[in-house]
Image (tube, rainbow, N blue to C red):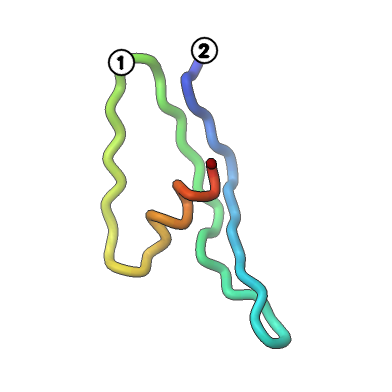
Amino acid sequence: MPLLEIEDLHVGFPTQGSVLHAVEGVSLTLEEGEVLGIVGESGSGKSVALMALT
């Protein structure tokens, strides 16, 4: 049984007349004893994806 499982996570922010898609379709599974590192360019949605879990 996974400690954390995320399937098809999407996060968007409403703007004037549209939506800014910050995270699109993130999926991951974290099992007991595993370590996960999330790496990406500045502004790629790393922090937004993790903040969506809280």
What residue does disc 2 label?
Answer: 1
Q: How far is the residue under mark 2 from the one under mark 1?
A: 12 Å
Q: Indicate left or right for 40 with 21 as reference.
A: left
Q: Which kind of residue does numbered mark 1 sit on?
A: Gly
Residue 17: which numbered mark, if any? Answer: none
Q: Which kind of residue does numbered mark 2 sit on?
A: Met
Secondary element at image label 2? loop
Name the residue: 52% across, 30% down: 5
Looking at the image, do the residues carrying marks 2 and 1 touch, with CB atoms under 8 Å apart? no
Where residue 21 sits: x, y (%)? 57, 69
Q: Quadrant of residue 35?
A: top left
Q: Residue furthest front?
A: 54
Q: Indicate left or right for 1 with 38 as reference.
A: right
Would you place residue 47 above or below residue 7 in this image? below
Secondary element at image label 1? loop
Name the residue: 46% across, 57% down: 48
Sequence order check, earlier mark of 2 and 1: 2
Name the residue: 61% across, 65% down: 12
Would you place residue 11 above or below residue 1 in this image? below
Q: Nearer the viewer, residue 50 or 40?
A: 50
Would you place residue 45 above or below residue 49 in this image? below
Name the residue: 30% across, 34% down: 36
Where residue 24 sits: x, y (%)? 54, 58
What residue does disc 1 label?
Answer: 33
Circle 1 residues within 10 Å: few <14, some 14–19, many ≥20:
few
Circle 2 residues within 10 Å: few <14, some 14–19, many ≥20:
few
